[in-house]
Image (cartoon, grey):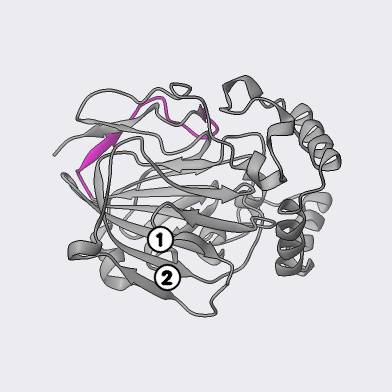
């Protein structure tokens, strides 16, 4: 099985859309979007939020602050907190919960060291994990789930299970859009984009949760380290959390957030869990719903 498969041919307009992703100034667009999203422009900001919410049919009644005027910046709105109980967490010690709202982009078994990105495209664990061969070996033949967060979704990311953080890695990269269309047409998309890799210990073995950056995703942050980017490092950077620095989180607890949309990828070791049968490509999901069941 090769890392890519070009057996299908996109149309002229599709090829044009893909080509634009390669030539557009990704980093400058992202910086501008981040700058604008942090500006406090009073009534104008509230109007932009209202128009955005209407366009994407966002349910403000489930937000902890339901008025557009409650948000001084667009980023404050975009990373809005939900009301307590708006996302019930699946019960049961053996049940894992989905980390985010969105749609399942792909999920299933890792074939040796290859994950399916979309129909016709595969990418390697080692590339996804920033060249960490030992970590990639850990998850060979394991299980993965990729969740795409669209602009209309709740953009905080939560824990699938109780876990203890051991390592966080920032991997610099491109800032391609990660929508389903681009996932089908840009090879190695998730292994090329900027990302934050979080390695956890759990009762059923190691687990990785990856926050993948994208065009105009101004920043990614975690609850233990705050904003990771910017600054955007030009090399892979590791942080370790051993002993007194270890960070323990509970199932359903918030672990991070995107300022503008992107993708979350979860990795589990071989034979440690089974995915919920209803999780198929394109399936809409909510944070807290059943991701899978621990088998160890």
Which percent across, then down, holds residue 210?
A: 43, 54
Which percent across, then down, holds residue 108?
A: 37, 41
* Residue drawn 40% across the image and 26% down it: 289
Q: Of residues 190 and 6, which is closer to you in this image?
A: 190
Residue under numbered circle 2: 130
Q: Is residue 5 visible?
A: no
Residue under numbered circle 1: 197
Which percent across, then down, holds residue 293?
A: 25, 31
Q: Are marks 2 and 1 in contact (CB under 8 Å)?
A: yes
* Residue drawn 66% across the image and 39% down it: 77
Label 2 to label 1: alpha-carbon separation = 9 Å
Q: Of residues 158 and 21, which is closer to you in this image?
A: 158
- Seen in the image, is 290 located left or right of residue 78? left
Q: Is residue 288 visible?
A: yes
Q: In this picture, which residue range is highlighted in magenta?
A: 270-284
Q: Secondary structure at mark 2?
A: loop
Q: Of residues 249 and 287, which is closer to you in this image?
A: 249
- Seen in the image, is 148 located left or right of residue 199? right
């Amino acid at each position: 099985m090769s890392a890519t498969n070009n057996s299908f041919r996109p149309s002229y307009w599709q090829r044009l859309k893909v080509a634009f992703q390669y030539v557009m100034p990704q980093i400058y667009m992202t910086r501008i979007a981040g700058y604008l999203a942090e500006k406090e422009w009073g009534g104008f900001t509230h109007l932009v939020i209202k128009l955005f919410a209407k366009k994407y049919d966002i349910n403000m009644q489930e937000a902890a602050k339901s008025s557009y005027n409650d948000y001084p910046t667009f980023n404050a709105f975009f990373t809005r907190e939900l009301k307590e109980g708006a996302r019930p967490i699946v019960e049961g010690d053996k049940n894992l919960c989905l980390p985010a709202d969105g749609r399942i982009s792909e999920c299933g078994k890792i074939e040796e060291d290859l994950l399916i990105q979309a129909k016709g495209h595969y990418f390697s664990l080692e590339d996804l994990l920033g060249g960490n061969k030992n970590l990639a070996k850990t998850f060979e033949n394991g299980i993965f789930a990729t969740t795409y967060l669209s602009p209309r979704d709740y953009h905080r990311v939560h824990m699938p299970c109780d876990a203890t953080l051991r390592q966080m890695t920032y991997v610099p990269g491109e800032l391609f859009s990660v929508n389903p269309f681009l996932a089908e047409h840009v090879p190695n998309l998730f292994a090329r984009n900027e990302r934050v890799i979080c390695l956890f210990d759990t009762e059923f073995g190691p687990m990785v949760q990856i926050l993948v950056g994208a065009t105009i995703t101004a920043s990614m942050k975690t609850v233990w380290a705050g904003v990771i980017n910017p600054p955007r490092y030009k090399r892979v950077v590791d942080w370790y959390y051993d002993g007194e620095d270890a960070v323990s989180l509970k199932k359903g607890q918030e672990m991070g957030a995107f300022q503008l949309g992107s993708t979350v990828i979860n990795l589990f070791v071989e034979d440690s869990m089974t995915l919920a049968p209803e999780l198929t490509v394109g399936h809409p999901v909510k944070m807290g719903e059943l991701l899978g069941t621990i088998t160890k």
